[in-house]
Image: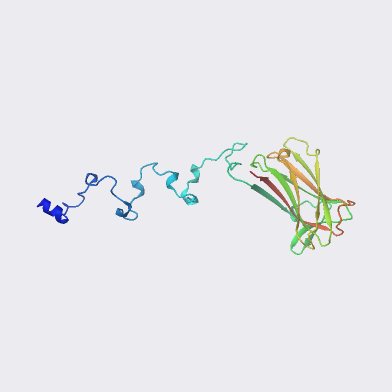
């Protein structure tokens, strides 16, 4: 009778539920199509059984990562931080609007809704700012000081920048260094940018740094006959891999 059923292909009922174990299944014979969708649960996975080769590239997002498990390199002062190997073009920007700048001998005013400092072409005038170099600045980061200014007339403006850097305990009244830059006005009431770069070796984290921003009368390269209006001073601490 058993031979008859085998030849005829008639199915034989199995005795009760949960009666098939791994010994009744040929090794390697259970396929994807035999599994119910979402049948394999987290508890069925062995610890440390999923590696990067089993994860779709760039598929893990912030919600899938426990940030407390990330180990970041330490910077020069011992704090964990993103360093040169982890992120390119790192920038920390500090912005001084005209209202936050010591006007010195420049004239405070307004251009429409913008506060400005006016630098007259016929008189040498200056304004100044002071700040602290960020204590967590990435080592090897240059400093770029950028003047955002406008004017109504045609011509170029020659800007003279003096800087002094002092650590705690140092004399803050000596050691000024100077930089000069001439920038043509792009057009009536167009915002212009004039940049000065201070090398990373010239500043240290936590240093007090002061700048005097000047427009001097009688400079041949300064051909703008109308006031130059200073809107902003930007300090960018930048490193590029």
Colour scheme shown? rainbow
Residue at the top extreme, as displayed = 169
Q: Residue at x 67, y 49 (%)?
A: 93
Image quadrant of residue 187?
bottom right
Residue 196: give x, y in percent of width and height.
76, 47
Give the side of residue 16 with respect to residue 67, left or right: left
Residue at the bottom extreme, as displayed = 112
Q: Along the line of sight, which residue is nearer the eye, 129 or 82?
A: 82
Q: Residue at x 74, y 61 (%)?
A: 114
Q: Along the line of sight, which residue is nearer the eye, 85 or 115?
A: 85
Residue at the left extreme, as displayed = 1
Residue 147: give x, y in percent of width and height.
76, 52
Q: Residue at x 22, y 44 (%)?
A: 23
Q: How many marks?
A: 0
Q: Is residue 219 above or below residue 115?
A: above
Q: Along the line of sight, which residue is nearer the eye, 65 or 132?
A: 65
Image quarter (top left, top right, bottom left or bottom right) of the C terminus:
top right
Q: Is residue 74 above or below residue 92?
A: above
Residue 82: give x, y in percent of width and height.
58, 43
Residue 25: give x, y in percent of width and height.
24, 47
């Amino acid at each position: 009778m058993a031979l008859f059923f085998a030849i005829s292909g008639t199915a034989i009922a199995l005795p009760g539920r949960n009666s098939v174990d791994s010994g009744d299944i040929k090794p390697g014979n259970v396929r994807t199509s035999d599994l119910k969708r979402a049948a394999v649960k987290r508890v069925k996975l062995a610890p440390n059984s999923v590696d990067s080769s089993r994860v779709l590239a760039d598929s893990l997002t912030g919600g899938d990562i426990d940030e407390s498990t990330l180990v970041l390199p330490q910077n020069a002062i011992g704090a964990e931080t993103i360093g040169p190997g982890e992120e390119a073009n790192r920038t920390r920007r500090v912005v001084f609007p005209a209202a936050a700048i010591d006007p010195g001998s420049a004239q405070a005013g307004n251009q429409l809704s913008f506060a400005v400092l006016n630098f007259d072409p016929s008189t040498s005038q200056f304004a100044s700012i002071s700040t602290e170099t960020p204590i967590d600045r990435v080592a090897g980061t240059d400093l770029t000081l950028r003047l955002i200014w406008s004017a109504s007339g045609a011509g170029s403006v020659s800007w003279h920048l003096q800087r002094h850097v002092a650590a705690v305990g140092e004399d803050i009244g000596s050691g000024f260094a100077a930089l000069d830059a001439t920038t043509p006005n792009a057009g009536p009431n167009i915002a212009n940018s004039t940049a000065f770069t201070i090398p990373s070796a010239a500043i240290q984290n936590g240093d007090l740094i002061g700048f005097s921003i000047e427009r001097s009368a009688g400079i041949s390269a300064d051909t703008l006959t109308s006031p130059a209006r200073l809107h902003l001073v930007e300090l960018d601490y930048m490193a590029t891999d």
